Image (spheres, rainbow, N blue to C red):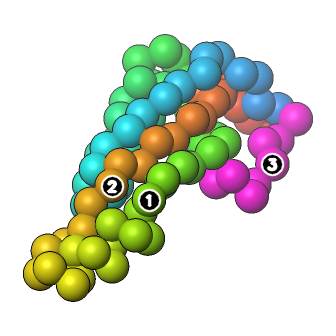
Amino acid sequence: MLLPSDTSDSRCEPVADLHASADAAHFHLIVSRLRTEAGRLGANAVHIRTLEAPGLVEDFFVGMLIGGAGGGDIDADAAALHCGPP
């Protein structure tokens, strides 16, 4: 799993573009969905290119004020990669 600040190795070839989203409270589902779909496509790595959470900070503070966890959705765009041996 590569994060937006990482660069992919030259041994890695793109397989497909991926997208996943979930409620901020379930961020782990985004990672799971991306890994599952990449594996289904024959990839052995995922590079998350962007993570967007419009209104997440505002939702968090509103949730704190009214006694909730806060919400908001997180969207992730990623690339499924097939990386060869070193």
Residue with the mark numbered 2: 72
Q: Is 69 located above or below residue 22 in the figure?
A: below
Location of residue 33 with respect to 16 vertically, above or below? below
Classify mark 1: helix, strand or loop.
loop
x then y, percent, for residue 63:
22, 74
Q: Amino acid at mark 1?
A: Gly
The prevailing secondary structure element of the residues shown in magenta is loop
Label 2 vs label 3, nearer the camera: 2
Q: Amino acid at mark 3?
A: Thr
- Please indicate, yes or no, whether residue 60 appears anywhere in the rendered image: yes
Read off the magenta span.
3-10
**First of labels 2, 1 by sequence position:** 1
- On the rendered structure, is 76 left or right of 50? left
Category of crowding for the residue at label 1, using alpha-carbon neighbours closer than 10 angstroms: few (below 14), some (14–19), many (at least 20): few
Other-residue count near label 3 (Cα within 10 Å), few / some / many at <14 / 14–19 / ≥20: few
Query: Label 2 vs label 3: CA separation?
Result: 28 Å
Label 1 belongs to which residue?
Answer: 55
Q: Residue at x 66, y 42 (%)?
A: 49
